[in-house]
Image (tube, rainbow, N blue to C red):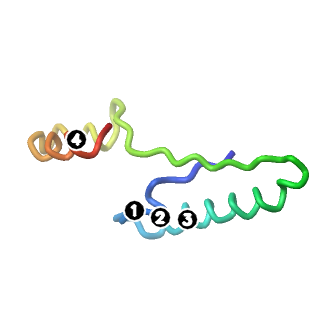
Amino acid sequence: MLVGSVSSSLPSPWPQYAAAKAALEAVARSLAAELARDRIRVNCVRPGSMMFDGGAWQGYARAEPEAFQAFASTDFP
C-alpha cells in the first residue's frame, strides 16, 4: 500500500512534492503489473484535502474566512 496525492495530477504550488508523488504512482502501477502473475496486489491511495484541527486549511479559514468559504463551497465534498 502506497500513499500518493491528488497533487500528482493537479496543479500544485510544490512541484517537487507533486513530481515525487507522480513517480510513486508510476512505481505502484509498474509493481502491480509485475506482481499480478503471483497474485500480489499493489495499491496506491490518493487522499485529497482534509480539514483537521491545527491543519493548514483551518489556518486559511481563520485568516481569510470569506475566501475560504468560497473555496470550500465548490472544492470540498
Q: Where does label 3 land, which residue? A: 22
Q: Secondary structure at mark 3?
A: helix
**Amino acid type, callout 4:** Ala
Q: Position of residue 23 (x, y in %)?
A: 60, 67
Sequence-wise first label, 1 or 2: 1
Mark 4 and mark 2: span between their CA atoms? 22 Å
Task: Determine the secondary structure under disc 2.
Answer: helix
> What is the quadrant of residue 55 in the picture?
top left
Q: CA distance from mark 1 to mark 3?
A: 10 Å
Disc 1 residue type (three-letter): Leu
- C-alpha span from label 1 to label 2: 8 Å
Left or right: where 2 falls relative to 67: right
In this view, the residue farthest toward the right is 38
- Report the residue marked by disc 4: 72
- Given contact means CB atoms under 8 Å apart, are the residues at marks 1 and 2 in contact? yes
Residue 65: which numbered mark, if any?
none
Q: Position of residue 13 (x, y in %)?
A: 34, 65
In the rendered image, residue 52, in percent from the top left (x then y), is placed at 36, 32
